[in-house]
Image: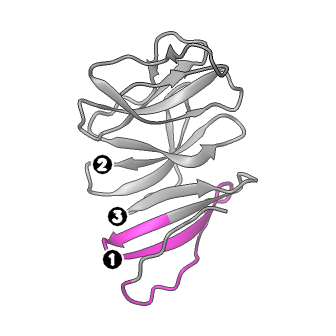
Amino acid sequence: FDIWKQTLPGSYPIEMTHSLEWTPKGFGITNDGKSMFIAADFQGNELMQIWTLPITGGLPERVTHTDDKRFMATTNGLLDDGHLIITTDSLGSTMDVAILDLQSGSLEPLTASDTNYMGIELSPDKQNLLILEMLSNTDNNLYLLNIESRKLKLLTPPDGEIQYYGQGW
């Protein structure tokens, strides 16, 4: 699997990625429109790493370098400063939400716990993040996280085993 672009109807497609080892699982365009970020795994291991690639083409640059973690981009997760909100997974033990600097690869945690938090979607004003807490396959909660204050607000009552789904704004 690779990513291709086609600028105009009837024009020839241009292959943006070509790898026999890394498979793109998702991508997005940076706020300045000059590059894209790609989540790709190595030979199907599902441990996605984040890469950047200039829109004009060239070689992708790997941003994350932790092969025993999975990095998943959050829907609409680009902040105004170009940082990306991601969910990290330590081989299934816990999941947390963090801000990834696409230039340096540094991570700033937004949640840190012994549970599983997953970033669902950033609000249109980029002030709040909808977060899913996965307690089991049949039980979860939804939270609202204020990006600036880092305060979590429970949106769903913990009333037995109930599955809640964040559907965006």
Instruction: Please state which of residues 143 and 168 is positioned toward the viewer in this rendering.
Output: 168
Identify the colour scheme used.
Answer: one colour
Residues at marks 2 and 3, CA–CA distance in whole angstroms: 11 Å
Task: Tell me, for residue 126, which label it has, or none.
Answer: none
Of tags 2 and 3, the one toward the viewer is 2
Q: State how far apart marks 1 and 2 are (Cα).
A: 21 Å
What residue is at 61 percent from the left and 47 percent from the top? 76
Q: Quadrant of the N terminus?
A: top left
Q: Is residue 125 above or below residue 14?
A: below
Task: Find disc 3 in the rendering and name its residue.
Answer: 114
46 displayed left or right of 52: left
Q: Which amino acid does label 2 sit on?
A: Ser
Residue 28 on image: x %, y %? 57, 35
Q: Give SS at disc 1.
A: loop
In the rendered structure, which disc, 2 or 3, sits on the residue that comes first in sequence? 2
Q: Earlier along the polypeptide chain: callout 1 or callout 3?
A: 3
Query: Which quarter of the figure has residue 169?
Result: bottom right
